[in-house]
Image (cartoon, rainbow, N blue to C red):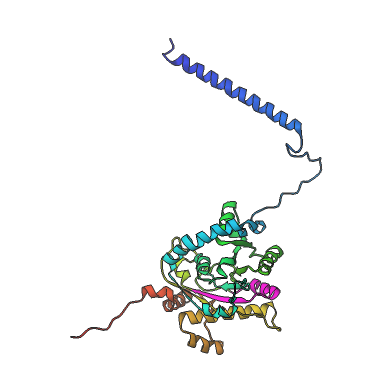
Amino acid sequence: MAPRGAQPLREMRLAGRAIGARGRRMSARMKRRIGSLGFPYRAPEVPRGVAVPARASTLEANYDTTWAREAPARAVRRLLTTGPLRLLVRVLADPEVDGVDRLADYRPANDEDPPAFIFTPNHHSHLDTGLCLAAIPEPWRSKVVVGAAADYFFTTRISAAASALILNAIPIDREAVSRKSSDLAKQLLDEGWSLLLFPEGGRSPDGWGQPFKGGAAYLSARTGAPIVPVFIDGAGAIFGKGMKRPKPGRTRVVFGTPILPNESDNTRRYNERIEQAVTELGDEAITDWWSARQRAARRANPALTGPEYTGWRRQWALSEQRKLGKSGERRRQKRTWPKFD
């Protein structure tokens, strides 16, 4: 004898199976009807022997960021950069900004648009972009585009959209010279947008700088936009490459005098001048202006790339250098003179 309740349960199972079978039949019938309609309700047929080329990717270097420079996106970005982003930078990095007066001669007197600049800072941390966006003075701050690595920030639709909206970033191919990236950057510079570009191409792997690549020099020579050298001190000790979480500290952002290519400069020599300008700012940031100028006259400023030797001596030299800059201030012992009655 079947237990009580078994018959209704069996009937419910049979009814569920019948409904499922009916749904599958309806779905197959609907597919046949749609398929009989042909193009454009379904994909066109491909003749035999014809190879259909793969669709071009719309990510990485091919991501379209035009929408991020329209009025609605600019309004949202202004709220984010003046609010949460600036607060985050202030809490984590507590930046001190110097050298803004060196841009005063380029500031328009009236409500005219400012000349387009190419800002070229050193690159040790993910905080560098936020630090620069917070430190760049108006009227350039509200119209600056960030050159970001296409193979890092634009690999998925979510990260690409976030980078374009929050940072006003455009994809830059750092592995090879991309005509599309350079043409887009040139177009934006011609339209009056300034460009924030990291000439090292990526964050420092060991705390020391890397040789500059010639992209910024090429764009400056091609468009006539002045290069503004920038040095960021202390960001690598806060959230450098390989660190899992940031360690709050202090930073310093120093702007240099804008420079333009000489008539005798090619891209390589101009790039060397840009790297030397950032090197002199780095010396100024961790020592003082007068000593850095004296060493610059002798071409004796400490190189951004660090000493030639490797191993533990290189790391020891890095720790000694950081004691001189903003990153070492929180670790310094504050001594006071004893009080005598």
Seen in the picture, residue 336 relative to 247 is either above or below; the reply is below
Q: Nearer the viewer, residue 136 or 247?
A: 136
| Residue 233 seen in this snapshot | yes
Q: Nearer the viewer, residue 118 or 80?
A: 80
Please provide percent x and percent y for residue 190: 68, 69
Q: Is residue 60 left or right of residue 79?
A: right
Residue at 54% across, 57% down: 76
Q: Quadrant of the C terminus?
A: bottom left
Q: Nearer the viewer, residue 330 or 256?
A: 256
Q: Is residue 6 left or right of residue 270?
A: left
257 in the magenta segment = no
Please provide percent x and percent y for residue 11: 51, 16
Please provide percent x and percent y for residue 115: 63, 73
Instruction: Please give the range of residues in magenta.
Output: 211-232
Task: Please identify the residue farthest to the top as the structure is shown.
Answer: 1
Q: Is residue 97 left or right of residue 29?
A: left
- Asked which quadrant contains residue 69, the reply is bottom right
Task: Please identify the residue farthest to the left as the structure is shown.
Answer: 341
Residue at 74% across, 39% down: 43
Residue at 65% across, 69% down: 192
222 in the magenta segment = yes
